[in-house]
Amino acid sequence: MTEKDLLYDTILARSFSRNEQKRLGYGAFIASLLFVFTLCTVFKPYLSPLPPIVELQLPVNAGLRMLRITEPQKPQALRSSNNTTYGDSENLTIPTDQINITSNATTLQKLISSEDHMRSVFKDTSLPKSRLDSFNSTTNTTISKEQVITEDNKMEKTIKPICKKLARTEICELNGDVRVQGKSATVHASIAYAFSGNSTWHIKPYARNGDVAAMDRVREWTVKLEQNADLLSRCVRNHSVPAILFSLGGYSMNNFHDFTDIVIPLYTTVRRFNGEVQFLVTNRNQPWINKFKEVLRSLSNYDLIYIDEENETHCFATVVVGLNRHPEYYKELTIDPSYSEYSMSDFRRFLRDAYSLRNAAVNTRKNQLRRRRRPRMLILARGRSRAFTNAGEIARAARRIGFKVVAAEASGDVASFARIVNSCDVMLGVHGAGLTNMVFLPEKAAVIQILPIGGFEWLAKTDFEEPSKGMDLRYLEYKIAAEESTLLRRYGRDHEVVRDPSAVGRRGWEMFQSVYLVQQNVTVDINRFKPVLVKAFELLQMQSV
């Protein structure tokens, strides 16, 4: 028997013919090729850098959700649309050091598009509060794209939003080489990264977006990002501290809007600088500056600059254009500590320091003669509309209950009036800007708001009732009857002004304002009002127990 016959006479030979063995050999060879090709395909991403054309999705963590590899070195500058609702949040972005992500990819772009993901971001406590601001609004929020950049597997950079639009405000924060030109109302910022798309943002630095009448009185500024610093205007004045650019237009000099649109937003924006900040004022308003000089001096160690009048280019390392404000549209005189590092308690403490106010909380304890101190009541007088026609009767009724009564009208001397308010335990007034002075009341004091006829319930709740809670004040309310309004005598009971205020309101704000805010005064029914005074007295006595 030959050697070939011996090889054939094996176990395999007994099972398969020669032709079948050939077919098996070919099959094994093809299977080997397929196995090798599969190994190369699976492990190729780990063996060499990814080409730019490859698109791959991979999860990084719950905070970043989904990242997609895109063409390298092409970050997008995002520009807002003028048709977006005021509840939307929009971002203009530039690269800044922020987080580290291990990856061989050159550029990672984060895509966030669903409301479900937005809610997950709210729950991510690793995100800073300033970032959470841009997600909150009273309407559906549009989240813009954000990019993450890595360089040679070292520290990666996130394109952080420098401009954001919230329900009531717009704000841009620029860092690096920033140059401000007052005459042209332009802020230029030099950046080191190439941008494709629009790199310009138009902003009115006053915190009352959505109010056309107010915003028409605010100068518009342009924020421009430039990759080539040589294109920027030459620096004439260099500053060593950050700058805040804000407007004194809008509804300034109305006490309510002074605080809710300017003073409180200014405080939450600049307090972190501890005075080392330069104010750049657009829409110069000297009476406002005189009115709030104590606040301005307490927030900045430097003389403010009326930037509209400046021909020179001012240069800074950091410029903030606009002011922070509560992210919800219908929130007045309020700081929500969940969206800010400060609270209304912090703000009121700041006011006490700025105006040297003595009383942090009401004091109804007994004096050294063991006699209980009589609580002080301030009756807010008004010289024109919504005035008390029987303020003397109200004062006598309050004294009989046990109050010591002071009557005063707010003036442009904020410091003097703040001391009067701070010395009182109760403040009583008809709905109006004067009630804003409750910010100076001691904690646990009481506010009594008188509502004229005309359907003031919503305004009363939004402007003063809800804010009083954040100030740790006791709130009481008295809604007058038609007989207590001077409009009854002027128009008669059957006139729609008295009978159906909603019909008047449907004709527009101007009509409502002229009738119910301008023409109306109040004559309080003492017998009907007395239980409210008694309740205020009892609330104060409870503090001493």
Image (cartoon, rainbow, N blue to C red):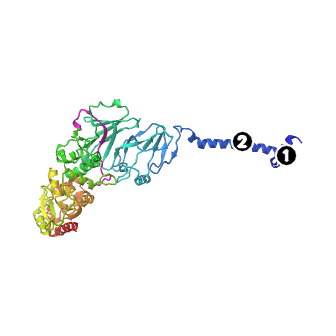
Write the residue at 16% across / 69% down. 530
Q: Quadrant of the C terminus?
A: bottom left
Q: Quadrant of residue 462?
A: bottom left
- Mark 2–mark 1 CB contact (< 8 Å): no
Above/below status of 443 relative to 100: below
Does residue 256 belong to the magenta stretch?
A: no
Residue type at tag 1: Asp
Does residue 23 appear to the left or right of 511 in the view shown?
right
- Which quadrant does the N terminus fall into? top right
Q: Nearer the viewer, residue 481 or 469?
A: 469
Q: Is residue 332 above or below residue 363?
A: above
Mark with earlier residue (2, 1): 1
Q: Nearest the camera: 72 or 314?
A: 314
Picture coordinates of residue 97, whole percent (x, y) = 40, 41
Q: Is residue 266 visible?
A: yes
Percent x, y of residue 120:
43, 54
The magenta segment is 307-333
Q: Which mark is residue 29?
A: 2
Q: Amino acid at mark 2?
A: Phe
Q: What residue would you read off at disc 1?
A: 9
Q: Residue 427 appears at what percent x and percent y?
A: 18, 60
Q: Secondary structure at mark 2?
A: helix
